[in-house]
Every structure is written in C-alpha cells, then in structure tokens.
Amino acid sequence: MKNYILIAYPRTGTSWLGGHFIQYYGKSNYLGEFFSEVYDEQSYIEKVSFLEKEREINGEEYYIKYMLYQIKDIEQYYPNWFDTFYKNFKKIKLLNKNVWRIFLSQQYQLQNHKFESNSWKIPDYKLKQFSINLNQIKKFVKDYSDFFHYDKHNILFDYDKIDDDYMMKYLGTKTFRKRNRYIHDYESFLLSDIDLIKDNLKKEFQKYNIELLDNGKIL
C-alpha cells in the first residue's frame, strides 16, 4: 500500500479530493488538515510526537492535508522534519489554476468565519456581501505565488484534469460516493469594483510571472 500526503493551497478542491483518500485509507487513518488551528510550540510538539510514535510503535501511517504555511510553521520548530519524515511518501501537490475563483472564495471565507468549508456540497448556499482591498490582494498573491513555485513534491495533480473516475483508477478504489461540486457565485456578492480588483490582481501576479486565470481563460 502506498502512502500519500497532500500539499495544497486553501479553497482549491482539497475537501473533495480528500474524500477519495478516506475511501483509500479508511476513516481511522485519515487525519485531514491535522495541523490546522495549531498556534504554539507545544501544539506542534504534541502532533509531531503523535505521528512519530504511531509510526514507530504501531506501524501506522496517516493521510494529512498540508497547507504550505503549515509546513513552514512546522519547520520553525522542527527544521527538515517534513522532508525527512515523508521521504518515502507520495507527496501530491494539487494545483488549481482558477486563481480568480480561488481568490474570491478565500476572501469570502476569511471575512465570514461561519462559512462552511465544505460549502461546495451545498446547492444554493446563502452568501453574504463582502469587499476586498489592496492589502488583501497583495497578501493573497504572495501566498499563492509561494505555493505555485513550491517544488518539494513528487506528484502533481492539475485540478482541471482530474475527476472522480480518474481518482478511483489512480488509487485502485472500486467504489466512491460521487457528489456534485457546486460553484458559488461570489462575484454577485462582491461590493468592490470587480474590474479594479482584477486589474490589481494581474499587476501583482505579473511580479511573480503568474497568469491570472478563471476557468482556464486568462483575465
């Protein structure tokens, strides 16, 4: 049995993809975003210790979804731990290049803390109005660019080229409960000038040699 971890950026389809790894591993060995909501050194010590003991004592390995900032945070306390611990793992990078949609989705979530991260499962999800400023644009572009250029992976999945059938064949799983992935219309609830936001995004991304895409089209 091969072991996998996922390296991703928020709001890029990781929850949907994770469903396939629950099927592959079973719920007991699926930890999801294990390092979310970790705010101090003690929390990192406890989680890293758990993973190391589970491997050493029980021979257990776990699927974990890592956001790049979480890997960087771990490295502050455990330099090179990530690379060493996962040296024999299949490290999947999920690249979703629909940057405009990702940007709107993340900004909405950051401003609406009760927003359900799995809202892609819910048709006609009730959205609220929100706005975006230049500082938020700059932070997003810097964070996404760091992830875009991250290269410590050995498998690259293009979100637009994978679906349920592809993942079932890839993992060798025979059954999967397929669910629709709903795309919410964030633009209709954006109070800020959309053209101005897109223009500022493009200008910032040009600094990192990244194109601003939406549904595969350059904006």
Image: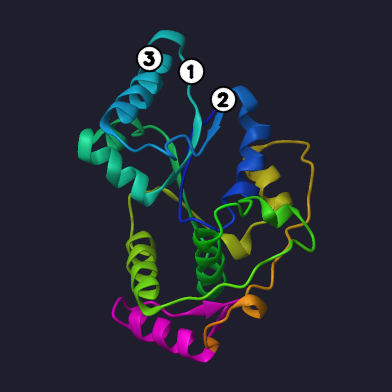
Q: CA distance from mark 2 to mark 3?
A: 14 Å
Q: Are marks 2 and 1 in contact (CB under 8 Å)?
A: yes
**Viewer-closest of 8 and 143:** 143
Sequence-first tag of 2 and 1: 2
Q: Residues within 10 Å of mark 1 (few under 14, many from 20)?
A: few
Whether the magenta-drawn stretch holds residue 196 is answered as: yes
Q: Are marks 3 and 1 in contact (CB under 8 Å)?
A: no
Residue lying at the far top of the rendered structure: 57
Label 1 sits on a secondary structure element that is loop
Residue 70 locus on image (x, y percent) = 36, 44
Q: CA distance from mark 2 to mark 1?
A: 8 Å
Residue shown at 43% from the left, 16% from the top: 54
Please name the amino acid that badge 1 sits on.
Answer: Glu
**Viewer-closest of 195 and 130:** 130
Q: Which residue is mark 2?
A: 29
Sequence-first tag of 2 and 3: 2
Q: Residues within 10 Å of mark 3 (few under 14, many from 20)?
A: few
Residue 49 locus on image (x, y percent) = 34, 20
Residue shown at 34% from the left, 28% from the top: 43
**Viewer-closest of 169 and 175:** 175
Give the numbered dot on residue 60.
Answer: 1
- Residue 129 in the figure: left or right of residue 86: right
Q: Which residue is mark 3?
A: 53
Please name the amino acid that badge 2 sits on.
Answer: Asn
Residue shown at 47% from the left, 34% from the top: 34
Q: CA distance from mark 3 to mark 1?
A: 9 Å
Q: Which residues are magenta?
A: 195-219
Q: Does residue 209 lie above or below 22 as drawn?
A: below
